[in-house]
Structures are given as structure tokens and as C-alpha cells.
């Protein structure tokens, strides 16, 4: 099938609350709250915002007893499963389990005492709560770091995960997912590839553990977004990864939105909201495409409609280039041509273009594309064709006036 990614690598499935991770479950989006977990109302407000933005699972820090107490109050009221992030005190993990969290995240580089690790795994096993082995290139066990030549390598990160997993298995616990994050994108990619191929994690049925992807400390926008996307998308396109998190230095809602959009753009999740596409504009543009696209995005995103809408700068190429969009508009001769699946359904004045998009988006949302096509206004297609023909007459094939510019340049040359 055109556009299909290579198949996902087989992994076992675990349940984080009621959300399946791994196996044939859709790839999920995670994010993390930035509030103090002891601030129950503040944290819940952020969890709700993250869930609304597309997060399937939310992680909260459990760095002190007050945070664990906060979790006990947050978990029953949360709309999505909660993961407790445990730093270096295994008691916080035991407290988080008492609080009823749906998953723990342990960093093997921070809690290194085997007895404590096994105590947490045993308690999690008794409650049916999974654990993410969250290896971080920046906080490897110093002994491991030394063994790998004083460098953070992909092999060292995977070895850290193996060590933790082996301890878990000693107490009969293997309800895990694993991450091997690094802030260096090529290193992170190499570590996940190594992990995905490592027979140590693969069971008799050829399934590995579910993998949680992320580029740690990716940083602020836009660089953080690019780095995280480069790492996560590369692996997803190789069939690696069951759940993802963007670690951005930004409002965590941005992380959830980015995660969701990445999965939708790769066809790994169904589109939940608007997908606005727009042409980059060129010499043919009959309108300020950037301003029009921004305005359309604002007007349509509130509608929460899972459709693709195209904003195109001209009627010469616009409708053709965006014919796969559910709905679109292209500008020409002070008018906007509204099209549905490439067929013109209405021609409106330039200052009514955004209102027209909202109107037709409503029809598609309520009654579907075919109903919108059936309601095409009489004469719209002919009026649009007349505009297009007139513009082609005016602009010809050289909309960017290249030939005219060449003549001017030549004339300048002649003067010197
Ligand atoms: S040709 Fe038209 S649709 Fe294509 S980039 Fe230029 S203005 Fe936009």
C-alpha cells in the first residue's frame, strides 16, 4: 500500500492502567507534568490539558512523600493513566504504588542497590503494575560508564537496561517497557536499534519488550522539536517504538500536541483534529497565504473536526495540488474558490474566505463529503474556471516574472 511504514517490530503488550502499550496497540503519546505533584488541583488541571491535547498517559514526579500523597489524590480523578517518576529513593516507588499509580518509571542509574530494585519489582508485581526501565545517557551508573571507556555509548545504555531487567526477572517480574534516551540524536537512535535487536529481551515468540521512545532534554522550540522528531520519527519509520514522549523545554501541552501530530502524520494514529495544509506561496499567490492560513487555523481548530483543509495561494495550481484535501480554498482575482475533494463548490469574496471554510467544514462534519459535494452552488464551477482562465491569460506561464527580471539584469549588464 502506498505510504505504509514498514511493519512494527513485534513486542509484548503491557497495560498501563487501561491503556495498552506494545503488541498490536496503537503507538501512544506521553507527557509529563511540570507542577509540584503535591499541588493536587494544579497537577490535575495540567493532566486534563495534556489529555485534551492528545496525551494517552501522563507522568508525574514522585520525588518526596508529599508528592506520593498528592498522587493518592490525583490518580482517582485523572482522565488518563498516571506514571510515577521515581528518582533515587526506592521508598518513593513503594509509596507511589500505595497511591495507586498505573506504572512506575525507575532510572537504573539512580537506584543501584539490587535489593531495593528487587523490592520495588516484587511490590509492583503483586499489584500488577508495570515498570518502565528508564535509562538516561546522562545518568548512567558510574561503574558502567567506566567500563565503557568513560563514554556514554549505546552499548552502555543497553547494558544498563539489561542489568535492571535481569534483577527484575530474579523476582519473576517482567511487566516492563524500556527507554534508552540520550540528548544526542544519533546516539539515541543507535541505542534503540541495539535494544530492539538484543536477543536478551526477545522471548520464545520473537517478541521484545515494548519500547518508550524519546530524545531527552531536547530543549526549547524550535530546535527541541526538530531533535525529538528526528530521533523518534526515524525509529518509528523502522518499526521501532510503542509509546513516545517529546521532552521539550516548553509548556508540556506542546509535547502532547507534537507527539500526537507526529503519529498522525506517520499514519500511526487516526487524525483527531484539523490537519491544515497550505502552499508555501510563490509569485502566483493572489493573497497573503501565511495570514490566511493562520486565520483559518485559528477559526477551524476550535471545531475539533478530523478533516484535512488546504489553503492555497492561487486558483491556477491550488485546487489541483490540494485535490486530496477534504476541503480547501484558493485565492484568485479578489475571490476565493472553495473546493471539496478538488471540486469547486462555491466562489466567495476574498474577505469571506475564512467564514466560507468554517461553513463548509461544518457541512462536512455534520453530513460528510458527499453531502457537501451535492450542495455545490450552481455556477460555482463555471465561475471558478473563468477566474482561472483569466489569471492564466494575465500571468501566462511566468508567474514569477523571471523572464522580465532576466531582461532587467541583461540591461544592467549592458550599461556597465
Ligand atoms: S502556484 Fe499557487 S498554490 Fe502553488 S505555491 Fe504558488 S500560489 Fe501557492
Image: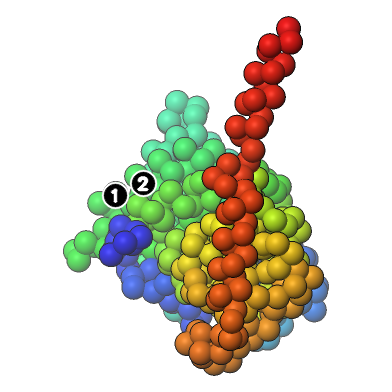
For mark 2, give the secondary structure: helix
**x, y (%) of residue 161?**
42, 50
**x, y (%) of residue 16?**
49, 75
Q: Quadrant of the C terminus?
A: top right
Q: CA distance from mark 2 to mark 1?
A: 6 Å
Q: How many marks?
A: 2
Q: Quadrant of residue 292?
A: bottom right
Task: Between residue 385 and residue 39, name the one nearer to us.
Answer: 385
Residue at 75% of width from left, 73% of height from top?
349
Locate residue 199 relative to residue 142 in the image: left or right.
left
Cβ atoms at labels 2 and 1 below 8 Å apart: yes
Locate residue 394 relative to residue 270 in the image: left or right.
right
Task: Between residue 189 and residue 233, name the one nearer to us.
Answer: 233
Q: Quadrant of residue 23?
A: bottom left
**x, y (%) of residue 320?**
49, 62
Task: Between residue 284 and residue 71, name the one nearer to us.
Answer: 284
Residue at 29% of width from left, 49% of height from top?
198
Label 1 Cα neighbours within 10 Å, binned few <14 / some 14-19 / many ≥20? few
Residue position marked by numbered label 2 in the rendering: 193
**x, y (%) of residue 411?**
69, 18
Residue position marked by numbered label 1 in the rendering: 197
Determine whether 311 is above or below 142 in the image: below
Residue at 70% of width from left, 75% of height from top?
348
Label 2 Cα neighbours within 10 Å, binned few <14 / some 14-19 / many ≥20? some
Amino acid at each position: 500500500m502506498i505510504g505504509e511504514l514498514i511493519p512494527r517490530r513485534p513486542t509484548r503488550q503491557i497495560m498501563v492502567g487501561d491503556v495498552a502499550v506494545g503488541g498490536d496497540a496503537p503507538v501512544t503519546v506521553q507527557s509529563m507534568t511540570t507542577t509540584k505533584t503535591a499541588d493536587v488541583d494544579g497537577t490535575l488541571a495540567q493532566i486534563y490539558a495534556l489529555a485534551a491535547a492528545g496525551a494517552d498517559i501522563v507522568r508525574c514526579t514522585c520525588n518526596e512523600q508529599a508528592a506520593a500523597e498528592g498522587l493518592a489524590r490525583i490518580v482517582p480523578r485523572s482522565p488518563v493513566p498516571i506514571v510515577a517518576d521515581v528518582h533515587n529513593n526506592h521508598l518513593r516507588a513503594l509509596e507511589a504504588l500505595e497511591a495507586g499509580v498505573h506504572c512506575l518509571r525507575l532510572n537504573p542509574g539512580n537506584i543501584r542497590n539490587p535489593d531495593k530494585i528487587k523490592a520495588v519489582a516484587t511490590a509492583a508485581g503483586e499489584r500488577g503494575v508495570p515498570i518502565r526501565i528508564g535509562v538516561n545517557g546522562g545518568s548512567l551508573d558510574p561503574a558502567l560508564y567506566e567500563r565503557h571507556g568513560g563514554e556514554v555509548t549505546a552499548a552502555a545504555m543497553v547494558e544498563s537496561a539489561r542489568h535492571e531487567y535481569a534483577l527484575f526477572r530474579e523476582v519473576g517480574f517482567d511487566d516492563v517497557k524500556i527507554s534508552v534516551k540520550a540528548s544526542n540524536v544519533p546516539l539515541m537512535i543507535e541505542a534503540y536499534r541495539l535494544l530492539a535487536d538484543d536477543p536478551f529481551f526477545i522471548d520464545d515468540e520473537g517478541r521484545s519488550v515494548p519500547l518508550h521512545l524519546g530524545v531527552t532534554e531536547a530543549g526549547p522550540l524550535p530546535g527541541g522539536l526538530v531533535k525529538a522528531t528526528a530521533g523518534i520519527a526515524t525509529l518509528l519509520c523502522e518499526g521501532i517504538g510503542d509509546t513516545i514522549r517529546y521532552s521539550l523545554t516548553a509548556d508540556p501541552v506542546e509535547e502532547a500536541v507534537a507527539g500526537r501530530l507526529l503519529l498522525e502524520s506517520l499514519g500511526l494514529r487516526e487524525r483527531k483534529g484539523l490537519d491544515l495544509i497550505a502552499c508555501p506561496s510563490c509569485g502566483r499567490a493572489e493573497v497573503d497565504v501565511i495570514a490566511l492560513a493562520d486565520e483559518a487555523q485559528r477559526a477551524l481548530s476550535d471545531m475539533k473536526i478530523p478533516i484535512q483543509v488546504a489553503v492555497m495561494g492561487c486558483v491556477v495550481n491550488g485546487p489541483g495540488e490540494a485535490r486530496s484535501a477534504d476541503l480547501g480554498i484558493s485565492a484568485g482575482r479578489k475571490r476565493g474558490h472553495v473546493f471539496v475533494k478538488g471540486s469547486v463548490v462555491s466562489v466567495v469574496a476574498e474577505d469571506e474566505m475564512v467564514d466560507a471554510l468554517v461553513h463548509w467544514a461544518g457541512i462536512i462534519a455534520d453530513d460528510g463529503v458527499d453531502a457537501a459535494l451535492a450542495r455545490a452552488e450552481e455556477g460555482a464551477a463555471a465561475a471558478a474556471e473563468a477566474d482561472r482562465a483569466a489569471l492564466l491569460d494575465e500571468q501566462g506561464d511566468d508567474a514569477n516574472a523571471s523572464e522580465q527580471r532576466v531582461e532587467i539584469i541583461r540591461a544592467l549588464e549592458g550599461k556597465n
